[in-house]
Image (cartoon, grey):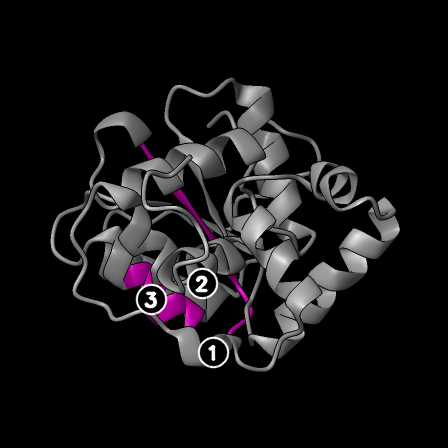
Amino acid sequence: MVITDAPDVEVVGEAGDGAEAVRLTAELAPDVVVMDIRMPGMDGIEATRLITTGPGTARVVVLTTFDDDDYVYGALRAGASGFLVKDMALDDILAAIRVVASGDALIAPSVTRRLIKDFAARPTTTPPRRARLTGITDREREVLTLVGSGLSNAETADRLCISVATAKTYLTRLLAKLDARDRVQLVILAYEAGLVAPSGS
């Protein structure tokens, strides 16, 4: 209801569970899907995976309670372009939807740091994908490490003594070389490749 009230956002459909969300996304072709995690039947992670690997171009933002939700990492790996915390201010929720609709990922540096810290505390059965990183330069690896640690483009530029524009160029190259959809996937790759310290610091 509150999203509907935004003058520049049109709600084209509403689903009661994951399966319906997948069906409506295919039928209505929205720009952004705001996805809950815990739903009856198909959960939000599986629905996100089906939507992002399907033929459409819809991008998914997961709606969750970060501090007690064990599924954020799974949702991001399933292809979500970011996530919203349920107690966020309305303006922040709307801003997040606009960011994702514009083609970017919603993952603020402070949130990235919290994610990495949380990921590091969890066991994983997924082997590091170091082979994915063999095509990048040493400088690109440095940039990827900083992105994975939660630094913004400006912070990355400052740390490496380069311009913000150059930092953005490196980011664009990494997205292409690693076949990553957005900044969220780069963070995950950096973590899984062991570029981010296990402590999450």
Q: Can residue 103 be seen in this view?
A: yes
Mark 1 / mark 2, whichever is N-terminal: 1
Q: Which amino acid does label 1 sit on?
A: Arg
Does the CB distance between marks 1 and 2 fall below 8 Å? yes
- Separation of residues labelled 2 and 3 (CA atoms): 17 Å
Q: Which of marks 3 and 1 is in front?
A: 1
In the rendered image, the quadrant that contains the C terminus is top left
Instruction: Say which residue label 3 marks.
Output: 49
Q: Give the range drawn in magenta.
A: 47-65
Instruction: Say which residue label 1 marks.
Output: 132
Which residue is rendered at x = 46% and y = 28% of the image? Answer: 1
Q: What residue type is labelled 3?
A: Arg
Q: Nearer the viewer, residue 159 or 98?
A: 159
Which residue is rendered at x = 42% and y = 57% of the image? Answer: 188
Residue 178 rendering spot, x and y as whole percentages:
56, 75
- The answer to which quarter of the image holds residue 95 is top right
Residue 118 rendering spot, x and y as whole percentages:
29, 38
- Separation of residues labelled 3 and 1 (CA atoms): 21 Å
Q: Can residue 54 be seen in this view?
A: no
Q: What residue type is labelled 2?
A: Leu
Answer with left or right where residue 25 lies relative to residue 47.
right
Which structural element holds mark 3?
helix
Answer with left or right where residue 101 lies relative to residue 52.
right
Give neighbour class at mark 2: few <14, some 14-19, many 20+ (Cα, 10 Å): many
- Which label sits on residue 189? 2
Total numbered labels placed on residues in the image? 3
